[in-house]
Amino acid sequence: MLPKCLGDKIEKVQKRALRIIYPTTDNEDALNIAQCKRLDDRRQELCAKTFKKILKPDAHLNHLLPPLREESHELDLRNNSNFTLTKCRTERFKTSFIPAMTANLIASLKDEHLRAATDYSRTVVRDAMNLRSKFKDVGNRETISRLEEVINSIDTSIVWHVKCFSLFTSKDKIQRLEKKCNKD
């Protein structure tokens, strides 16, 4: 990883070169015309590509990676990443290649489980919430009350966790609740 100050200096060189080559266009258009990417984007892609190569067990630098989670303990955790985050005492070490790319990998894995709420998913959750309320779902009473506040708010930046969404809206679970409610 390159320090931000050095990355900015290199970026200025690229901007200056594009200004010389395409004097009448702005930087973004010049990048498009030249079919180039910003240098920091290219560096990020190359770092990710190199890190993926290092992840392979037969790679020469694989021994530099932090220990795998299953080797460090036996617990089954919600975080599905195989790596433990390296404790970094200095900012310089934190931004070095292996710790920074491990943190990026773990962050990207977390993001894979989150989905932005759509109108359809809001409707599905609202229907499941109403059915669970109707069938007196005691186990999800707090979840239902929080969802009522969130679903009816104007805020459109709601994000669902995929597993939580599927468990809460599961038709099988709601049918079991209905059968249990009808028995009583």
Image (cartoon, helix red, strand yellow):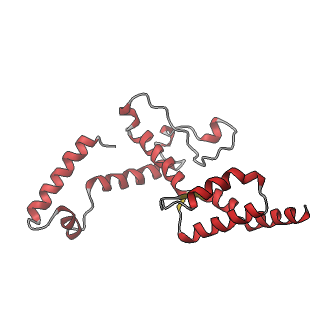
Q: Where is residue 150, by image quadrant? A: bottom right
Question: Left or right of 169: which side holds 46?
Answer: left
Q: Residue furthest top?
A: 89
Question: Which residue corresponds to the image point at 11% horizontal and 60% vertical from the top-left?
Answer: 19
Question: Left or right of 96: which side holds 109?
Answer: right
Q: Position of residue 12 (x, y in %)?
A: 17, 51
Question: Which residue corresponds to the image point at 25% horizontal and 46% vertical from the top-left?
Answer: 7
Q: Residue furthest right?
A: 183
Q: Position of residue 83 (x, y in %)?
A: 55, 42
* Quarter the N terminus occupies: top left
Q: Where is residue 20, by image quadrant? A: bottom left
Above or below: residue 116 compared with residue 50:
below
Q: Nearer the viewer, residue 84 or 137?
A: 137
Q: Nearer the viewer, residue 112 or 147?
A: 147
Q: Position of residue 53 (x, y in %)?
A: 46, 52
Question: Left or right of 168: which side holds 20?
Answer: left
Count of numbered labels shown in the rendering: 0
Above or below: residue 171 compared with residue 78:
below
* Quarter the C terminus occupies: bottom right
Q: Position of residue 112 (x, y in %)?
A: 53, 57
